[in-house]
Image: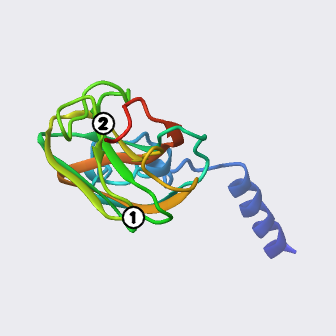
Amino acid sequence: MRPRLFLAAITLAACGHVETPTVDAHKAADAPATADAPPPPDARPPDAMPGVRTFTANSTWNNCPTQVDCEDVYDFDVAASGTVSATVSAVTMNSVPRLELFQGTATTGTNLFDNAATPVCGTMDTDLSAGPTAVAATHYRLAAGRDWGNSAGLTGTYTITITATVDLDNVSQTADDAPSNLPHCP
């Protein structure tokens, strides 16, 4: 009986006393982020796409109102001085393409591709290129349009390619078949 009593005494003594750890095993998980944490690549949010120098997309002109020159608008940002060019290719369905480049958030005023308030115009179902045009660090809008007065039918398809000597950031199509603010092609 004595060995049982001895073990019971040891167990009772040990259970009444708890040692606090001297090292927190979870310290790294509980601590706030420190300067030792690596920054995200290019200091961009982890889900943002890095800048590109060439953007290409296939699109259509299929909801253009009757007797209206319509355009698809592509917005992008430029972070440094450089040049921008654009090409509308693989044009179909008897469409006459037009290109316009504007600084800022409007699609009116001076078209930077021809330095006038007119579109750069192509011919039916042929590729159209404009640029290179000098750009500075700011926001731009590029319109890939279809000229109603010189096209036949109501719809068309095309491929837009925007190229630059500097990164193009946040490139996206922001308008589809919007009425153009510039005059008809000659």
130 left or right, relative to 6: left
Q: Which amino acid does label 1 sit on?
A: Asp
Q: Is residue 107 above or below residue 85?
A: above
Q: In this view, does 17 lie above or below 59?
A: above
Query: In the depicted view, which residue is nearer to us: 124 or 35?
Result: 124
| The furthest residue to the right | 1
Residue in the image at 60% along x and 41% along y: 66
Q: In this view, does 147 lie above or below 92?
A: above
> Colour scheme in the image?
rainbow
Q: Residue 170 carries which label?
A: none
Q: Mark 2 points at which residue?
A: 140
Q: Residues within 10 Å of mark 2 (few under 14, many from 20)?
A: many
Q: How many marks?
A: 2
141 left or right, relative to 83: right
In the picture, which quadrant includes the C terminus?
top left
SS for dot 2:
strand
Q: Can residue 173 be seen in this view?
A: yes
In the picture, which quadrant includes the N terminus?
bottom right
Q: Name the residue under label 1.
A: 125
Q: Position of residue 139 (x, y in %)?
A: 30, 33
Q: How crowded is mark 1: few (under 14 residues within 10 Å), some or many (20 or more)?
A: some
142 left or right, relative to 64: left
Q: Where is residue 132 in the image (x, y as percent from the top left)?
A: 14, 50
Q: Position of residue 154 (x, y in %)?
A: 58, 53
